[in-house]
């Protein structure tokens, strides 16, 4: 097979892992596939060295203006991608016009959007920047949940390590599953997470309440997902009336008690399916679902697949020793952007 050229676009404040992660995947394709390797190059405006967001200096192979059209154009994320210079936007648009594949990692999607490449496309980016991308480019369909999205010749991934998952998917497309598997093993990873896997834990996405009684209720919910978690029972634990509790909880946590409980139970079930060999009925009981059908509906609505399919796709490899985590999800330790579907306000 003829080597496919992959051009990495570099600019100041680029995220170094968005470059090196996919680079390691593509560079591992040669020994893994036994075929001609990818032809990897980096380029920047003027061919000048760039300083990454973490302070690492990268020396590009070439000047972007001197590069021919690559098979795959890869635009990594970084602060500079959100306010790119016009000449960088222009050159990315020119190179992308003839490329067979255009890939963004993390906030690299902003640069592609500035270049007019994402209009009418479904894309993703780092969850903390999905809302901003959607506001700035209303003609782009931004999906905050998947770790990567492929829409025609345009592929986009979520933050940092999701770029590795997307690169593995591209290698699998080019060289087959066995090649991708060998690379993943070399990098000490699972083969790859399918693109539809959620970007982050629903539980970690919730806010921690300000008042101690409500925080204690949050911890109780996390520790006892199979208990009576109706509003009257939770209100008694907080020494509030059901109406006061529901109002205060929603104001401080950002979601209703019912939605919060649903998220904790779903997260508990996900972890058990991923890391234990408990049967579906056991998982449903431990996570607080009255029936397996109730759990199936929750999974289908939130994740797009039933529990059995979720386990098949995301369970730890069978050669790992069985591991049974506690039947609860850890309470959130910090404020974050909100449960999936809520707009993110993070500026990181």
Image (cartoon, helix red, strand yellow):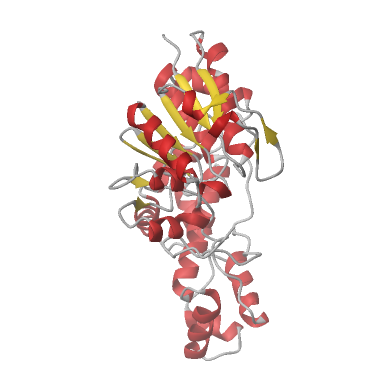
| Left or right of residue 216, residue 257 in this image | left
Which of the image's four quarters has the C terminus? bottom right
Q: List the single residue furthest toward the left.
A: 120
The percent coordinates of residue 293 (x first, y second) are: 35, 56
* Residue 309 lies in quadrant: top left
- What residue is at 45 percent from the left and 48 percent from the top? 110
| Left or right of residue 227, residue 143 in this image | left
Depth check: give the residue in front, 242 or 140: 140
Q: How many marks?
A: 0
Depth check: give the residue in front, 304 or 237: 304
**Residue 39 seen in render:** yes
The percent coordinates of residue 330 (x first, y second) are: 63, 60
- What residue is at 51 percent from the left and 81 percent from the top? 251
Where 215 falls versus 189 (above or below)? Answer: below
Where 168 falls versus 289 (above or below)? Answer: above
- What residue is at 44 percent from the left and 60 percent from the top? 131
The percent coordinates of residue 171 (x first, y second) are: 46, 23
| Left or right of residue 234, residue 197 in this image | left
**Residue 197 seen in render:** no
Depth check: give the residue in front, 51 or 206: 51
The percent coordinates of residue 347 (x first, y second) are: 56, 61
Which of the image's four quarters has the N terminus? top left
- What residue is at 44 percent from the left and 17 percent from the top? 4
């Amino acid at each position: 097979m003829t080597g496919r050229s992959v051009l990495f676009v570099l600019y100041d404040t680029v995220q170094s892992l968005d470059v090196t992660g996919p680079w390691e995947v593509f560079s591992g394709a040669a020994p893994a596939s036994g075929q001609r390797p990818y032809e990897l190059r980096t380029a920047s405006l003027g061919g000048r060295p760039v300083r990454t967001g973490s302070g690492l200096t990268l020396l590009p192979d070439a000047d972007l203006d001197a590069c021919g059209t690559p098979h795959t154009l890869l635009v990594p994320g970084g602060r500079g991608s959100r306010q790119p210079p016009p000449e960088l936007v222009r050159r990315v648009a020119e190179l992308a016009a003839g490329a067979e594949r255009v890939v963004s990692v993390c906030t690299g999607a902003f640069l592609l959007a500035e270049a007019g490449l994402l209009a009418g496309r479904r894309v993703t980016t780092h969850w903390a920047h999905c809302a901003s991308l959607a506001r700035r480019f209303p003609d782009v369909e931004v999906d905050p949940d998947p770790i990567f999205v492929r829409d025609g010749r345009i592929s986009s991934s979520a933050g940092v390590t999701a770029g590795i998952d997307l690169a593995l998917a591209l290698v699998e497309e080019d060289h087959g599953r066995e090649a991708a598997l060998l690379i993943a093993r070399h990098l000490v990873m699972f083969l790859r997470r399918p693109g539809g896997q959620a970007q982050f834990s629903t539980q970690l996405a919730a806010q921690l309440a300000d008042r101690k009684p409500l925080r204690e209720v949050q911890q109780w919910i996390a520790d006892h997902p199979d208990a009576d978690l109706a509003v009257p029972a939770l209100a008694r634990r907080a020494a509030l009336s059901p109406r006061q509790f529901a109002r205060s909880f929603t104001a401080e946590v950002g979601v209703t008690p019912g939605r919060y409980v649903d998220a904790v139970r779903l997260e508990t079930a996900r972890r058990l399916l991923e890391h234990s060999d408990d049967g579906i009925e056991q998982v449903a009981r431990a996570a607080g679902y009255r029936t397996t059908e109730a759990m199936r509906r929750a999974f289908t609505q939130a994740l797009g697949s039933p529990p059995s399919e979720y386990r098949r796709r995301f369970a730890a490899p069978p050669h790992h020793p069985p591991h049974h985590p506690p039947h609860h999800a850890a309470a959130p330790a910090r404020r974050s952007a909100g449960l999936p579907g809520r707009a993110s306000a993070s500026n990181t």
